[in-house]
Image (cartoon, coloured by chain):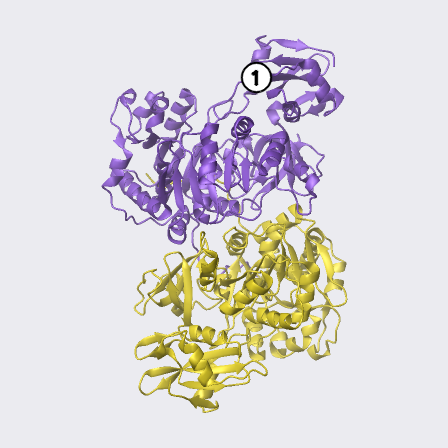
Chain colours: A purple, B yellow
Amino acid sequence: MARIESTMQDVQLSLTHILRHGEYVHGKSLVLTYDEAATRTFTFADTAKRTRKLANALRSLGIQDGDRVGTFAWNNQEHLEAYFAIPCMSAVLHTLNIRLFPEQLDYVIRHADDQAIIFDATVTPLLARAPEALAGVKHLIAIGKGDFSSLGREVIDYEELISGQSDEFEWPEIEERQAAAMCYTSGTTGNPKGVVYSHRSAFLHSLAATSGSVLAMSESDRALVIVPMFHVNAWGVPYAGWFAGSDLLFPGRYLQPPYLAKMIAQERPTLANGVPTIWNDLLRLGEETELDLSSLRSITGGGSAVPRSMMEAFQERYGVPLIQGWGMTETSPLCSVALPPKGTPPEKEMDYRAKTGRLVGGVELRIVGDDGSELPKDGIAVGEFEVRGPWITGSYFGDPSPDRFHDGWLRTGDVGTLDPEGFMQITDRTKDVIKSGGEWISSVELENEIMSHPSVFEAAVVAVPDDRWQERPLACIVLNENAKSDQTELTEYLSERVSKWWLPERWAFVSEIPKTSVGKFDKKVLRAKYANDELDVITIEP
Amino acid sequence: MARIESTMQDVQLSLTHILRHGEYVHGKSLVLTYDEAATRTFTFADTAKRTRKLANALRSLGIQDGDRVGTFAWNNQEHLEAYFAIPCMSAVLHTLNIRLFPEQLDYVIRHADDQAIIFDATVTPLLARAPEALAGVKHLIAIGKGDFSSLGREVIDYEELISGQSDEFEWPEIEERQAAAMCYTSGTTGNPKGVVYSHRSAFLHSLAATSGSVLAMSESDRALVIVPMFHVNAWGVPYAGWFAGSDLLFPGRYLQPPYLAKMIAQERPTLANGVPTIWNDLLRLGEETELDLSSLRSITGGGSAVPRSMMEAFQERYGVPLIQGWGMTETSPLCSVALPPKGTPPEKEMDYRAKTGRLVGGVELRIVGDDGSELPKDGIAVGEFEVRGPWITGSYFGDPSPDRFHDGWLRTGDVGTLDPEGFMQITDRTKDVIKSGGEWISSVELENEIMSHPSVFEAAVVAVPDDRWQERPLACIVLNENAKSDQTELTEYLSERVSKWWLPERWAFVSEIPKTSVGKFDKKVLRAKYANDELDVITIEP
């Protein structure tokens, strides 16, 4: 007998459903955009109306099905409107990272063939750095007033554009696999690559994010969205929060710690997300002034590994769990969340929370060895992580990149272990692995241990050539202001924490670690500086 | 420009993913089957192994892709194994209701063309009542020992069947729209109709059930599954709980209140589901003996309206929120959950909880008038509920039934209002509506008000012909044991709660309300008895 079909309705999964659900069921929930002068507040119901006005406006400008429409903006009300209007009208939202280097910005606008760009007036100078690409963009739409002379062309005012429009718009039927939104990865080598999310992937990702195994988001929550909306859709929180009816609190361009502290104290979010740097900055502010973080039931950190010491500080000083999540632009991003298994005794919780994360339902993870075979999930075997699932990319926009995929799984470029309870531990990037005498040293683990020293602000460890061992670690250190420490003290500190043969012989004390446009350590630059003898390296006998 | 495709992987949504995820990430979570002698416990990891043995066994019996395999069993370990093995091997799980009338059981086994049936030895006599249908079933597999002579044929022992099998099985690739499981509706008129769930619908329903807007299920939960697994897949909790890693606690055949009370006190579930009758029984037991319900963070009631008085009793006596959910076999069943909106003051919470429910994300609801046009969601307009979504049926197995659908929406046969915050209030079944002088009287609301009287055990209200008003309500009452009340007192009580013109003139005090095979009031029988003058009706002048 052959397989038979179900009798279920063939309803397509879409962001349009999420938009309508939030508007109807949670119409009184709020979108807040912080501003030093006066926080702006709209209900979901009013936001949905403005979304329909925007869709009418974009249609009137000639935006068609499948056209890419860029955004170049902070986290704010208008950006959220674009998040819904563009995909739901069957166009494609292309969130442009305002921190891209000019040549990258130029590349991605051209590569995506953006037909219009909605941008914040406050970042006009950054946008103006890609004049050639902008020449091919039909419409520039500015949020807020400003001096647009650097753009040398007509700019449409967002508010004027939508003000004359009808707040009725018949959203087209969506096919769930059609493109909804795209983000480019900011690879440290080569040109950025475009990841195109579908309505289906965004729907599934949103639902997964609200599940009890992840954030358990509900209408009772208020989510402070610090992760930029131009960075993997702010980890999907704007869509998930809208679906669940959680109030959405956007910081606009006010990302400095005193503003964030004020926002948290005033607006009382229950959830917040951000990269470790943000949380580190907030902790430091807390050493000078009193913080009221009492409204937060959980904060999420990701983008790079969250040091255990930072999680401990939040827990001990403020009673707030800082939970690590892991994912990539290619993975929408939700793949793992470091929530301890049930029954974990309190004194063991941090051991689990310090791991990279626990696999989330909907996604599959495996590790493979150099020969491409799957390795055991025993917490010991080390291999490259590969990931598979309905919100994981299977190619890149206009660029299939077969070397990045393996039998339909995405090769993450991250290396580490998977344990029998679904916890992953990333120990390195494939390209950052240090292979010393045939054995692997984890640059990330060394960095984390060094960064747990109170005098250290940041530490990056890279592989450098070694005559005897083929490769050995070089530790590049940024000390805290006024802190005093040196290679001898740090070696002693480290020797209690890692194997003796991991201890770096080479140390460089630097004023800053070079970073990529999304704030990750740019180890390629460090390796080049070392090769060109541009670092002041101290060599010791450990 | 035409729509463009995303770059997302085309991974199919399936119960196989849920099975694998629970086994790997939550392998230590537990499945408990209560037994008076000794509760049986298996880990998820061991359960998954047994599932693969069962798949091998069924394959060895000749079960092929698309074959229907019936179950006729209580909630227990083996039933859960069948829940996964049958759909994941690409066959179709057909849960047979052990409470079906013999002619219905005969009909559904034949109609589904079940190739094998897995049944509990304890319900052998019930199964034996459909001998002609069983003649067409190739294999009967018994869980537990018993006397099978009434079946007059060979019976395979479940444990023996799987014991010799390999615990490795390569689950086939699933296409998400293929049939996974089926349930027949127990319509009060005509033959039962089959609803066929897909892997896709089961996956989406499971994820939705774990969301923060519904049950927020996580690994920390222990779910007591009282709703039968032969009744709309126990409202989807076995799949959702397995996905989230919640311990699953099955009561087997021990559904009497003292057993349930013991199970709750001993095994400390955090969640439980059941029909109002179950919760009513438990409340009554609590009036005689002390109950320990302290482990429960929430219990879910559905299948029929949960009286407000019952919710108040659970809240006041035990501090346990009894939350109403609403759905049907046709809707998988999750459609709405009566959780109050955020910011509801405590004294208003029960007003929201007493409504039928609040629309759940993923599903759309509308009400339509007699002419088929959509009515406003204003909490006032009354119409038939229609529902649409990826886990809602669009036809019946081998029976498209176009009269049950309207432009792709399922006609629910329920009548009521939708309010601006997504709350639905069912006031009646289309066929039970009482139309008095051109105005609608809600039989359900009358029943609820009458049942809130302390002397009343059950009350059913049906329309009866009336010379002056076309139709008027007849109230059929079952009093509590030893309770004394009469039509005069009940009328006085009611008159403070409903409009004067709703007050029934006709009262019948009966020993029980006739019920359908799933325990719902069988109003068709009451109307027939009235028409045949078989009821002892008192008529008063209100």
Graded by Cα atoms within 10 Å as few (under 14), some (14 to 19) or many (20 or more), the crowding at tag 1 reads few
On screen, residue B136 versus residue B491, left or right, reads right
Q: Quadrant of residue B155?
A: bottom right
At which x and y percent is residue A309? 63, 30
Compared to B401, does A415 lie above or below?
above
How many numbered discs sit on the rendered protein?
1
| Quadrant of the image containing the N terminus of chain B | top left
Q: Mark 1 lies on which chain?
A: A
Residue at figure coordinates x 57%, y 38% from the top left: A320
- Quadrant in the picture for the C terminus of chain B: bottom left
Residue A84 visible to the viewer: yes
Estimate the x, y position of residue B375 in percent, counting from the top left: 32, 63
The percent position of residue B197, horizontal first and vertical second, equals: 52, 60
Q: Give the vertical position of B129 relative to A46 (above or below).
A: below
Q: Is residue A373 visible?
A: no
Instruction: Kindly identify the amino acid type of the residue bearing the numbered disc 1.
Output: Glu
Q: Is residue A63 above or below residue A246?
A: above
Residue at screen point 59% across, 10% down: A535
Q: Is mark 1 on a helix, strand or loop?
A: loop
Which quadrant of the figure has residue A473? top right
User: In the rendered image of this protein, does residue B376 appear above or below residue B24?
Assistant: below
Q: Mark 1 points at which residue?
A: A481
Q: In this view, does B137 lie to the left or right of A131?
A: right
Closest to the observer: B540 or A56?
B540
Q: x, y percentage for residue A350?
A: 66, 37
Residue nearer the viewer, B150 or A505: A505
